[in-house]
């Protein structure tokens, strides 16, 4: 009888250990922890939706999103040493120029956009503005327009580039002078201007088409020659040049105009690399993350050429193309 008693105890303990072991194995397969993503302000809406979908599939993950101008996002890492797993920039050049090779190894370009001028039904001269006279309308003393800070946000320096290209197109250098106007309405990132526009404090803003569509604003489409959207006009866009502040005091980075291309990378010292890679696979999948990007007004350019292709993790290389064509 005593032997049977000890046998039952042994079997009970063994079953308990096996059960615990099974639970541990099961839990170890789940993704866990915080995932920190710095992203361009223009990606706020799609990234929130993508994060929600990813968290539903992975309830152990908590995604922390921080929106800012893309340059400001990079400087959180380079200047403030803030922890970050993934950075998504409205300009892939920011990753190449500020983060690679010290803070990141690779860069995948994933989406395009277009610069527009947004306004409301209450904007002064809103019934008259068009793609040919917009510089005259913005120069009107009765009109107030806003733009983002070129030193912090690609939309800011792209607004300058678009104005430069318009001046070249019209052979009228006086057009550049509109950038001296309404400087009190420059904000850190383009989405910061939305409240001012909706409150009727300003009449017009330079902004990305996707953001204007998300907020149901009136949109003035600009000519391809100045909207930085047409890859066939890459050489023409290169006539625009802007200097932005570099990583060190007194240092500047020269940026050349080009078609709008968004880029994304995982940081070398990502606090949660396993979750970061899983999120990136989810993000680039055409039926998941990229579907949301497209639904929210941007066009996919995957797979795009990457000059860092060999350093992209193998599981992500199918979302890019090598700069070097192998025989």
Image (cartoon, helix red, strand yellow):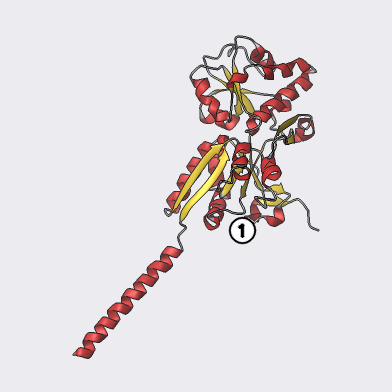
Residue 123 appearing in the image: yes
Drawn side of residue 32 relative to residue 18, left or right: right
Pick the quarter of the image with the C terminus: bottom right
Of residue 286 and residue 29, the one placed in the foreground of this image is 29
Q: Position of residue 52 (x, y in %)?
A: 45, 45
Front residue of 246/204: it is 246
Other-residue count near label 1 (Cα within 10 Å), few / some / many at <14 / 14–19 / ≥20: few
Quadrant where the image shows the N terminus: bottom left
Q: Which residue position is annotated with label 1?
A: 315
Looking at this view, is 269 or 298 the one in front?
269
Relative height, residue 139 to residue 98 (above, below): above
Q: Quadrant of residue 117?
A: top right
Residue 94 percent coordinates (x, y): 67, 40
Image point (45%, 54%), residue name: 58
Badge 1 marks a residue whose secondary structure is helix
| In-image side of 137 versus 307 (left or right) | left
Instruction: Using residue 154 as the reference point, say whether residue 240 is left or right of it.
Output: right
Asked whether residue 286 is in view, the answer is no
Q: How many marks?
A: 1
Residue 182 or residue 107, whichever sits in front = 182
Q: Residue 30, position in %: x, y?
A: 45, 60
The residue that appears at 30% across and 78% down in the rendered structure is 13
Residue displayed at 72% across by 48% down = 305
In percent of width and height, residue 247 lies at 68, 40
The residue sitting at the left extreme is 1
Q: List the single residue furthest toward the front.
A: 249
């Amino acid at each position: 009888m005593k032997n049977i008693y000890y046998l039952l105890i042994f079997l009970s303990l063994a079953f308990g250990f096996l059960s615990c072991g099974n639970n541990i194995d099961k839990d170890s397969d789940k993704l866990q922890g915080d995932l920190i993503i710095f992203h361009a302000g223009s990606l706020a809406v799609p990234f929130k939706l993508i994060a929600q979908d990813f968290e539903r599939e992975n309830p152990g993950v908590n995604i922390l999103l921080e929106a800012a101008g893309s340059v400001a996002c990079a400087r959180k890492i380079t200047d403030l040493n803030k922890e970050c797993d993934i950075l998504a920039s409205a300009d892939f050049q920011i990753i190449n120029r500020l983060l690679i090779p010290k803070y990141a190894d690779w860069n995948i370009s994933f989406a395009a956009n277009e610069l527009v001028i947004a306004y409301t039904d209450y904007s002064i001269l809103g019934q008259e503005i068009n793609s040919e006279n917009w510089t005259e309308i913005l120069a009107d003393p009765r009109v107030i327009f806003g733009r983002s800070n070129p030193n912090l946000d690609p939309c800011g320096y792209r607004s300058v580039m678009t104005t430069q290209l318009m001046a070249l197109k019209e052979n009228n250098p006086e057009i550049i002078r509109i950038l001296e106007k309404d400087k009190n309405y420059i904000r850190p990132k383009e989405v910061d201007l939305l409240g001012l526009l909706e409150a009727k404090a300003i009449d017009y803003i330079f902004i990305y088409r996707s953001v204007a569509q998300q907020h149901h604003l009136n949109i003035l489409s600009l000519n391809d020659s100045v909207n930085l959207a047409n890859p066939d006009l890459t050489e023409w866009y290169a006539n625009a040049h802007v200097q932005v502040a570099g990583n060190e005091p007194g240092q500047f980075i020269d940026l050349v105009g080009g078609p709008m291309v968004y880029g994304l990378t995982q940081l070398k010292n990502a606090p949660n690399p396993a979750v970061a890679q899983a999120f990136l696979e989810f993000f680039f999948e055409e039926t998941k993350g990229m579907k949301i990007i497209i639904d929210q007004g941007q066009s996919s350019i995957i797979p795009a050429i990457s000059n860092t292709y060999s350093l992209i993790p193998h599981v992500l290389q199918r979302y890019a193309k090598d700069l070097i064509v192998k025989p």
